[in-house]
Image (cartoon, grey):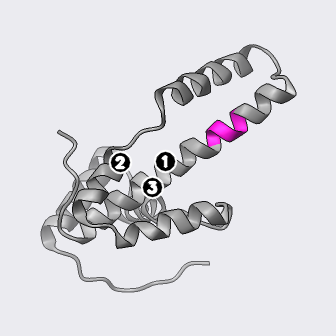
Amino acid sequence: MTSSTTVQIPQTLYQRLEHAAARLQKPVMDILVETLQAALPPVDDIPEHIKAEVASLDTLDTVELHEVAESQMAGTDQDALEYLLDLQAMRPLTAEEAARLASLRTEYGRVLLRKARAFALLAERGQPYSFE
């Protein structure tokens, strides 16, 4: 099902959208839909405690949001995630390994969702995050 609506956006933003569409050789509408899907991911399959944690970011100030935007998964967890993914490509994981991988994937997703929400809130507040 699709819906149609008219939205007023700044000309400069529309030009960026057109340039992206031209580079990717896709219609402007496809780029817009893909961008909105990435910015507004479905939340049906996210655990409730993570939904609540992400929603609580709305109350943070700009400095705190920048800290969330810069946050990362713990280095040891990142290493373990990479190791288990590599191991999974070589052989079936044991039950313990599979459980650890599932836990690490959930944590990775939690961190990414928090970061994405922080980026969105900063942009909404006129404080877009700089990746310099």
Q: Residues within 10 Å of mark 3 (few under 14, many from 20)?
A: many
Q: Tell me if label 3 and label 1 are in contact, CB under 8 Å.
A: yes
CA distance for labels 3 and 1: 5 Å
Q: Is residue 36 magenta?
A: no
Residue 93 has which mark? none
Which residue is located at x 63 percent, y 45 percent?
Answer: 106
| Residue at numbered disc 1 | 111
Residue furthest to the right in view is 95
Q: Tell me if label 2 and label 3 are in contact, CB under 8 Å.
A: no
Write down the region rendered in magenta: 101-105
* Residue 116 location (% of width, % of height): 41, 55
Q: Which amino acid does label 2 sit on?
A: Gln
Please identify, in this view, whether the residue under mark 2 or under mark 3 is nearer the observer: 3
The dominant secondary structure in magenta is helix
The quarter of the rendered structure image containing the N terminus is bottom right
Q: Residues within 10 Å of mark 1 (few under 14, many from 20)?
A: some
In the picture, measured across the screen, residue 111 lies left or right of residue 102, that is left
Residue 25 has which mark? 2
In the picture, measured across the screen, residue 86 lies left or right of residue 125, that is right
- Label 3 residue SS: helix
Rendered image quadrant of residue 80: top right
